Image (spheres, rainbow, N blue to C red):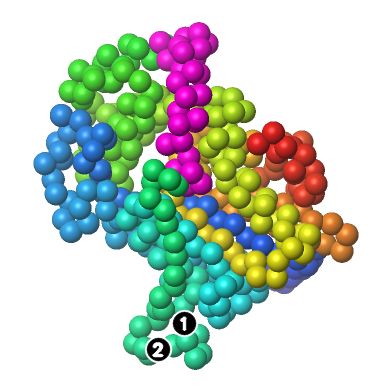
């Protein structure tokens, strides 16, 4: 018992020493929405046993109760980890919050903020409701180049060029036999890696809702040939520096501009935290651009947390990957840089992004 007590004391001291080594100056959190019902658009396939379901009351693509809880848990995680930095009182100018135009992303953002900033003291307006409204913004998808950059004409032009490269065609052609098999099984023509992407997300939405999937999905989902297909799609959409710059690079430029202003003391009104509620493509693209992506499909509520840190002599960038499922985070190391990464080194590594 005494040994365990001493060990806990030592661990707590180590955590305090590590946390005291740097001061947190700014925080960016990019996260995926929570669990959702299947969409009724391009994800649907003719042989889907649930194609006629209305998924009442959420509706197609709507945030489920499990998804709501997962997003609330993300807010709790952020509150517990960054409590001293954020302070307990919601101060509007100290938080920037933005979502894509999708309702599930907007709702996810509200859930994270409700856990992050429950009313305290004078902000309690209803003693029976531990919640307060917090403002956020969004832009229509066709002009949202930060959150939905894959709709950018320049990105699409480069992506179409990459898809015609012999080495890319070779990788896709290796999947042709499986495409033909999946076409027969699903009743939907599967001809591109984007089709793999759509099929995977339809099945995942049904899977996490506890719905019984067709027997033919066994062995190909969630791991297997369909997983190989969607990870190939991620690889193609981040195939070269230009694609990464036009996709995840938008996030990098966004938060490094804010960090640069903080370092150069160009503004006194910089928020402490910037919350960006989006989709798994945002997580994959940002991790790819930072050079820390490992092949996977970012789970619901997963997030990339970017910290601007300072010690007595310099500024640093820290990266954490919140896994979502399970609700914990891991520290990531930028290739060619220390942990945390000195800001000037980070900017040098990202100079072409």
Residue 154 as seen in the image, left or right of residue 289: left
Q: Image point 87% across, 64% down: which residue?
A: 312
Q: Label 1: how many residues lie within 10 Å, few (<14), some (14-19) or many (20+)?
A: many
Badge 1 marks a residue whose secondary structure is: loop
Residue occupied by mark 1: 119
Q: Image point 61% across, 77% down: which residue?
A: 87
Residue 81 as seen in the image, left or right of residue 352: left
| Rendered-image quadrant of the C terminus | top right
Is residue 92 shown above or below 66? below
Is residue 313 shown above or below 217? below
Question: Start and end of the magenta stretch?
Answer: 145-173
* Residue 171 in view of the camera: no
Is residue 215 shown above or below 210? above
Is residue 18 shown above or below 321? below
| Rendered-image quadrant of the N terminus | bottom right
Inspect the magenta stretch and tell me whether residue 166 lies in it: yes
* Residue 187 in view of the camera: yes
Of 334 and 13, the residue lying toward us: 334
Residue occupied by mark 2: 125
Q: Disc 2 and disc 1: Cα gap in Å? A: 8 Å
For the residues labelled 2 and 1, say whether their Cβ atoms are less than 8 Å apart.
yes
Badge 2 marks a residue whose secondary structure is: loop
Q: Image point 57% across, 33% down: which residue?
A: 244
């Amino acid at each position: 018992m005494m040994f365990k007590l001493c060990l806990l004391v030592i661990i707590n001291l180590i955590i305090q020493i590590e946390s005291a080594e740097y001061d947190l100056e700014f925080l960016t959190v990019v996260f995926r929405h929570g669990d959702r019902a299947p969409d009724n658009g391009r994800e649907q396939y003719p042989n889907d046993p649930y194609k006629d379901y209305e998924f009442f009351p959420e509706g197609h693509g709507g945030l489920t109760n499990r998804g709501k809880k997962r997003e609330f848990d993300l807010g709790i995680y952020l509150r517990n980890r960054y409590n001293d930095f954020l302070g307990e009182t919601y101060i509007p100018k100290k938080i920037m919050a933005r979502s894509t135009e999708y309702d599930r992303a907007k709702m996810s953002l509200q859930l994270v903020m409700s856990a992050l900033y429950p009313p305290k003291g004078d902000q309690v307006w209803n003693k029976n409701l531990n919640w307060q409204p917090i403002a956020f913004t969004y832009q229509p998808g066709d002009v949202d180049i930060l959150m939905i950059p894959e709709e950018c004409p320049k990105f699409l032009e480069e992506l179409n060029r990459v898809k015609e490269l012999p080495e890319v065609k070779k990788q896709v052609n290796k999947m042709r036999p499986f495409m033909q098999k999946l076409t027969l099984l699903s009743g939907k023509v599967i001809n591109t890696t984007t089709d793999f992407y759509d099929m995977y997300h339809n099945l995942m939405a049904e899977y996490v809702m506890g719905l019984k999937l067709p027997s033919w999905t066994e062995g190909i989902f969630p791991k297997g040939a369909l997983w190989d297909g969607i990870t190939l799609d991620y690889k193609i959409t981040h195939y070269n520096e230009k694609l990464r710059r036009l996709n995840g690079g938008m996030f990098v430029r966004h938060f490094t501009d804010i960090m640069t202003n903080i370092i150069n003391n160009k503004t006194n009104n910089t928020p402490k935290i910037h919350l960006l509620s989006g989709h798994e493509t945002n997580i994959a693209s940002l991790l790819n651009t930072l050079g820390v992506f490992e092949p996977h499909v970012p789970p619901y509520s997963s997030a990339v947390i970017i910290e601007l840190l300072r010690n007595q002599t310099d500024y640093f960038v820290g990266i954490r990957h919140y896994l979502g499922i399970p609700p914990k985070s891991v520290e990531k190391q930028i290739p060619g840089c220390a942990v945390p990464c000195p800001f000037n080194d980070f900017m040098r590594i990202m100079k072409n992004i």
